[in-house]
Image (tube, rainbow, N blue to C red):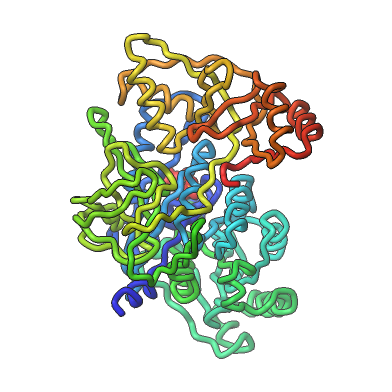
Amino acid sequence: MRLEEEIQRRRTFAIISHPDAGKTTLTEKLLLYGGAIQIAGAVKSNKIKKTATSDFMEIEKQRGISVATSVMGFEYKDYKINILDTPGHKDFQEDTYRTLTAADSVIVVIDVAKGVEPQTEKLVEVCRMRNIPIIVFINKLDRHGKDGFELLDEIEQKLHINVTPLSWPINMGPEFKGVYSIFEQKLNLFTPAKQTIEEYVEISDTSDPVLDEMVGTKDADILREELELVTEVYPNFDHQTYLDGNISPVFFGSALNNFGVMELLNCFIQIAPNPLPYQTEERLIKPTEDAFTGFVFKIHANLDPNHRDRIAFVRVTSGIFKRNVFYHHVRSNKKIRFSSPTAFMAQKKSIVDEVYPGDIVGLHDTGNFKIGDSITEGEMLHFKGIPSFSPELFKYIENADPMKSKQLAKGIDQLMDEGVAQLFVGKTSTRKIIGTVGALQFEVIEYRLLHEYGAKCRYEPITLYKTAWITSKNKAQLDDFISRKSGSLAVDKEGRLVFLAESKYALDLAMEKYKEIEFHFTSEF
Ligand code: G4P
């Protein structure tokens, strides 16, 4: 029974946004409500502001901050809420994709002036692939921005989601007066820089003269008209449709001014899903099952460069994880036990004895874990939906210090397990190719190889457009492809065959010619 109750009260989610839309500010205000932090400014933005220049200190800082803020748990009104932090920088977007595999729902933050920005589009696309329920928070209403209806149209078109507003703003910018909560049928009046709990004005319905008293007749009339239009155009909120990922409620507010945040949180705890079942290759795992299961969705290197220890972040998917109990590491087929599993509450880490489904436990790792690994009580389970994507940037990686080739090999191996980048080894040339989704990763790899492994690497350019994993049921055609394209073939870390396409033309041509070969652009096929 206890397990069931703990699952019911858990909400594990991620906040996603384009940088600068207000993700950090919103996170901080949520933590303030949960009493998890006392002062504003306590949550550090984990974005690397400098994008073009190589600023290693900045990278190091980023790593430090993101360990501290990777998971922020807090208690609010009998609910245990876990916010999974996602990196802001676009070069680390793959980390964000993986973090989303550990979340049961997301809140998307959109800047009222900027509307839907490119990074948000990409991230929401990943959410849609898994039908993750989405709540939208339109931020910075204290500034001038786009008209509410225009924004909702833009969200529907660019993010390909259906929306229904659960609050509606009364003006914006300097004339911003507050929002009308459609969800709770209350008026929430705006006062800049609120430090305390939001105060609502109860109104029976929108014809209530109290509305005119509070916001003036002109604005009250505009609100009435707009709400009428909202009712005509948008469907009523339906909980199940939201849980199925088919409708996204929208809220308006200003995170910086602590406005609309409590309203969002109160609705969130009511409607957001509690820990969901997980699909593995073998079967569906229900959180209520007695036996513990979990998977690694993120690995973080220790900050101390003298120790190569890492923290593996494990999402508990069923049962109760217990300290000092032997569990089965499926990939290595080994028993491992953990004497100091870590729980994450706000910015504090502490050793815990028991961890419930929906929660994230940090496990000390000396190099055993890899992203996607499962840990169970013995059952051989393999989690699905934690793909690597075909990288976009490529370089040859060479050893720049022949005395340190072992260190280099080990370093590359472990960094790849952490999911920093992907490694391909040329089938004929045996040269190593690093593939990444962002330019910054190359710097991170070079820097970390040197500082954590004492190895020096050098990059050399390679002309590559894309890589595709290839498979085929037609052995003759595959053999033909392999013999003709041997110079353009490589293997990934799992030994799977990869086609290195030099150009879009070469890729299109190969796909056209070899009809019975399947070209895969994510590692899960
Ligand atoms: P991010 O994590 O999504 O990248 O965004 P972050 O919260 O860091 O916010 C980006 C900027 O937008 C910050 O200003 C922040 O203060 C501001 N901001 C957030 N919410 C609101 C809001 O509701 N209204 C207004 N007017 N501004 C908001 P900054 O100057 O870049 O940083 P800082 O020096 O204030 O930290």
**x%, y% of residue 204?**
56, 90
Q: Is residue 303 left or right of residue 163?
A: left
Image location (x, y in percent) of residue 447 = 38, 23
Which is more toward the observer, 429 or 214?
Answer: 429
Quadrant in the rendering for residue 220: bottom right
Determine whether, in the image, residue 267 is placed left or right of residue 68.
right
Q: Residue furthest front?
A: 476
Please report the residue visible at 52 percent of the width from the left and 45 percent of the height from the top. 19
User: In this orientation, which residue lies closer to the viewer: 118 or 80?
Assistant: 80
User: Residue, x 33% and y 44% (percent of image)?
Assistant: 67
| Residue sitting at the far top | 402
Residue sitting nearer the eye, 333 or 221: 333
Residue 321 % position (x, y): 28, 61
From the image, which quarter does the N terminus lie in?
A: bottom left
Residue 34 visible somewhere in the drawing: no
Residue 453 vertical position relative to residue 285 in the rendered view, above or below: above
The answer to whether one can see residue 384 in this image is yes
In the rendered structure, the answer to whether residue 442 lies left or right of residue 33 reads: right
Question: In the figure, residue 320 lies in which quadrant?
Answer: bottom left
Left or right of 293 in this view: 337? left
